[in-house]
Image (spheres, coloured by chain):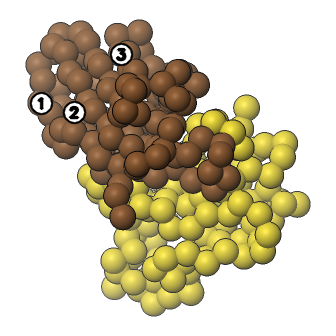
Chain colours: A yellow, B brown
Amino acid sequence: AQSVTQPDIHITVSEGASLELRCNYSYGATPYLFWYVQSPGQGLQLLLKYFSGDTLVQGIKGFEAEFKRSQSSFNLRKPSVHWSDAAEYFCAVRNTGFQKLVFGTGTRLLVSP
Amino acid sequence: AAGVIQSPRHLIKEKRETATLKCYPIPRHDTVYWYQQGPGQDPQFLISFYEKMQSDKGSIPDRFSAQQFSDYHSELNMSSLELGDSALYFCASSLGDRGQTGELFFGEGSRLTVL
């Protein structure tokens, strides 16, 4: 069964510093990969997605992610973090067809002044 | 652009009561998914429907049932509510596999509080 691992439960970054959130997946073929962000009590907002092609994908709010097949990873990055980026970030994976989206356990990002 | 609509947005029930959540997918989307997100947890898949038939089943309690209607909207029925059912319930829709995008579009969620 496919699974997603986000090894960091919490990460604290200083405002203006760079950010990298880790995500590893377990699946035989190349799945669809997603990053979502969720503010407390709010819905899930899609940041970016990877289906195929260029392994570096750009998303909203200045985020990008790189798919590395050899490492089964899809890490999220941002060069300069803003205080408004503080939220919960979920990596998710889905294979083709009607299959469900499987979420990682999430990483809570805290931004310090 | 039209999004996934969920109602009600907030719901408060007593233990052992029944609750019904509704989901209206994006027009022309034929697949609906239900997720449950407990406090501090990641969203857990409950059940999905494609063309009004159940397509996949996850960790949905036997006390819960769901269906997709002819207009593609879906309802999640929860009976004998327990305190542990308090959660944010998300609905998502997609074009099944025909859309070739692989993307699920999520609603804003329905927050259920069981007292």
Circle 2 crowding by C-alpha within 10 Å: few under 14, some 14–19, many from 20: many
Q: Is residue B71 above or below residue A89?
A: above
Horizontal and vertical percent position of residue A53: 79, 69
Calculate the distance from the C-alpha at mark 3 to the C-alpha at mark 1: 17 Å
Q: Is residue A41 above or below residue B21?
A: below
Looking at the image, which is closer to me, A74 or B23? B23
Nearest to the eye among marks 2 and 3: give it: 3
Q: Residue at x 29, y 19 (%)?
A: B77
From the viewer's perspective, tell me whether residue B5 is left or right of residue A38. Answer: left
User: Please, what secondary structure does the residue beneath circle 3 have?
Assistant: strand
Q: Residue at x 64, y 36 (%)?
A: A99
Q: Residue under mark 2: which chain is it in? A: B
Are the residues tagged 1 and 2 within 8 Å (C-beta)? yes
**Can residue B41 be seen from the camera position used here?**
no
Horizontal and vertical percent position of residue B56: 58, 25
Looking at the image, which is closer to me, A52 or A88? A52
Calculate the distance from the C-alpha at mark 1 to the C-alpha at mark 2: 6 Å
Circle 1 crowding by C-alpha within 10 Å: few under 14, some 14–19, many from 20: few
Looking at the image, which is closer to me, B71 or B73? B71
Looking at the image, which is closer to me, B16 or B53? B53
User: Please, what secondary structure does the residue beneath circle 2 have?
Assistant: strand
Write down the residue under mark 3. B64
User: Please, what secondary structure does the residue beneath circle 1 have?
Assistant: strand
Horizontal and vertical percent position of residue A21: 59, 67
Q: Residue under mark 3: which chain is it in? A: B
Write down the residue under mark 2. B112
Q: Earlier in the sequence, mark 1 or mark 2?
A: 1
Q: Residue under mark 1: which chain is it in? A: B
Instruction: Look at label 2 and name its amino acid.
Output: Leu
